[in-house]
Image (spheres, rainbow, N blue to C red):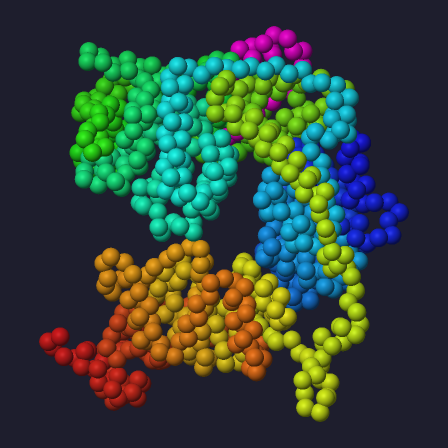
Amino acid sequence: MLPFLSHILDDLYPPNNNELSLNDGLLIMGKGLGLNLILKTMIQWHADPQNLVFLLNTSPEEAASLGITQNVTNATPPQKRQELYLKGGCLNTTSRILVVDMLNNVVPLHLVSGIIVNHCHLVKEASVISFILRLYREQNKIGFIKALSDEPYLFVNSKLDRILKTLLIRHVYLWPRFHMQCIQDIEQAGQIELVELRVPLSRKMKDIQAGLVECLNDCLGEIKRAHSQLDVDQIKLEQSFFQNFDHLLRSQLEPVWHLLPFKVRQMTNDVTTLRKLLHYLVGYDPVTFNWFLDTVFASNAAALTSNRVESASTWITWDAADIVFNNASARVYLKSKQQSELVLEPLPKWKVFLSILDEIEAERQSGNILVMTSSKMQANQLREIVSTRSHDKLLNRLFTKYSKWKKSDVLKALQPESVQQPVSKRRRMRGGKTQTTREPEQQDDLDILSQGLQIEDDTTSAPDYLFIEHYRVPTDQISGVTGYTGDLDASLLEGICPEHIVLFEPDMGFIRRLELFKALHPERDMKVYFIVYEDSIEEQQYLATIRKEKDAFEKLIQQKKGLVIPVDQDGRVVVDPEELFFKSVDTRVAGGQVVPLQKPQVLVDLREFRATLPFLVHAKRMKVIPCTLQVGDYILSSNICLERKSISDLVQSLKNGRLYNQCEAMFQHYTTCILLIEFDPDRAFRFLSQKQGPEDIASRLALLCIHFPKLRFVWSPSLETSAEIFEIIKREQPEPDLQKAVSIGTDSTTQRAEFNPTPMSVLRALPGINHRNYKHVMTHVKNLRGLSEMTLPELKKLIGEEDARSLFKFMHEKKL
């Protein structure tokens, strides 16, 4: 292990330490600097059965690469989970299962040695993992909490002190790539032989890139003018190269989304499309890229050829878009008045890639070759190019599929009849409208071009570009072509031990993993070919990623200098016994009697632990009891049942009738039924539509009130307010009965599962059959025919006099 990695472990596990708080720590490293090695070493240290350590926020695939074989998930039976907890070792556990077992006292918290939180940048203040850490620290003051992350820029906006408070940690350790010890340890092992190849874009690719950048910049400018309070530093062209830009833009527009014109909201969606096109330009072959552009235009063709131009994507009508569409089709074929010419322009990197393979084969004696790409599709295409040593067969096959798609029903379904042929040439009209000018015989020209291609159209022999996983080409020239997989790439390097590596697309994390691999194995010779498009979005994104991480570490270093952390922030400080005594008793009793204070109890359905409300309820000093509830989400007392809905869930449950059945079940077993509707005050919503009627959401909500007049509606603007509402409702209320609440609804659920749903729906539509008697009828009557043959006295005995008359009249009256 390198010295700087050993130094990091010494920070997390200080030797001869008598201060318990130093056992906790937040480690933030640069991407690709060996965080997986640190985590793997920690897991090996805690693999002893005498320890019980939980690893959180880690997928089973990542846990397997770290050496963990025991995963505790929702598929693990309760008895098996309890055995694993008592057996000890390091367990990879899902947070939802662990918090339920903690609340049910299945986990021996006093025996837990510590908790390791992986990818801690994903932990929020009111999250399940934060809930787990607080439950753990309440009952265990000795065990450690360690958090790890390699995404420093995600900590900048959240403020370092808040994250430390959420994780119950007082110490933070920063290890960027520019740390002096990192530089010294990595460079002293020797430099990797690096061959940087800057490939120029073709003329058509340059024009397409310039057109897309112009459209993207104009869209961002329109959005900024529509909402002047946007953060200008974050909403700019350079930031749009990053993956999380769409989420960042949406989060800033969300509070005023209902006030924005439709044009601006459409441009927000256009920004996502344009960003995809910029990445697809350098990552996709010309046929696939033009294919994607055709689908984009086809989806907007109906609006462009009608009077609904405002509902189409705005950027398609701009002059820069003409350049994009014309050059994209010109990379595939050219059409003139006399004849059509097949072009099929290959990606410039393909020629360079084949020349690199020839160079490697000429100079190498032995050793493996590894080719890394950023996507599965690109990896599959390179495998085909390697196997044939040419890109012609690949492009010919793709063009044949493209021409077949042109005349398929898929394209016709996307467009109206007037524009069923995709458009290559468009001219501007007044009012911003466009008119398609492609001739009807265009498809015939494509058929003629594709007939000259001598290729096999065998779907069984063609690679599957969507579903093929890691695959080794069975040739002597190359060992593997695969896509970047994050920290799992380190295991790939250790398994293949390549001598020559071709980076088809730049990736900062993988380049650093190569440096670390070379430092760990200085005796190995490696030659790396670094291919990047010159003056392209690909190059700008790579450089911007490096600059963004460096700026993030500099800001975190400044924040660390000014940190003022309370002594009791880690939760280890023991509460004063006198204060603890008065918190546990209720002195507000006549005569000054001291009576033990009982925590109010709330029964919570297991499915609710996907949300953070149970954590906030627990923070209100209420005892949360997880259980499986068939009726309701929260049971506040023996008579109070509560169903929680978000706005989106409310709309869906009103449309499919699920909410009606839930309310019906609640009123069968509880006297007070509450519908808690949570909404975000920063996000506007409305139930009224332009066409009001029975299908309108407001009308459905009114019908629900009519059917259940005793149903109580509670509107909550936040989860914190919901927890306060629980506290108010619980006052002077009897505690719920756990056994009774769990048993409610089980019989009816079993009975309902035995019924055929189709006759049941027909039965409920008959006069005299309602929600109170339909189950009774289905239990005592074999089928609908038997019901129709029953006499009036038999029906009166079964469902009552009034309902029996209505049903008998409907069944036997000749004229309906």
Looking at the image, the residue that sits furthest to the top is 362
Which residue is rendered at x = 23% and y = 32% of the image?
Answer: 432
Q: Quadrant of residue 148?
A: top right
| Residue 525 in the image: above or below residue 212 | above
Location of residue 214 in the rendering, given as x and y in whole percent from the top left corner: 38, 27
Q: Nearer the viewer, residue 469 or 530?
A: 530
656 horizontally vs 591: left or right: left
Range of magenta residues: 353-375
Residue 789 lies, in percent from the top left, at: 23, 80
Location of the C terminus by quadrant is: bottom left
- Residue placed most toward the observer, 375 or 248: 248
Which one is nearer the viewer's eye here, 516 or 743?
516
At x 67%, y 50%, the residue is: 161
- Residue 738 appears anywhere in the view: yes
* Residue 376 visible (yes or no): no
Rendered position, 128 above or below 146: below
Is 356 one of the magenta-colored residues? yes
Q: Position of residue 4 (x, y in %)?
A: 78, 33
Location of residue 663 by image quarter: bottom left
**Residue 284 falls in which quadrant of the image?**
top left
x, y percent for residue 378? 48, 26
Task: Residue lying at the far front in this picture: please name it.
Answer: 228
Tell which residue pokes out farthest to the bottom in this image: 591
In the displayed orientation, state which residue is furthest to the right.
Answer: 16
Question: With 232 as the anchor, is 141 left or right in this view?
Answer: right
> What residue do we see at 24% from left, 23% from top?
425
| In the image: residue 452, left or right of residue 615 | left
Q: Taking 614 as reference, is 45 left or right?
A: right
Residue at image point 43% right, 32% down: 275
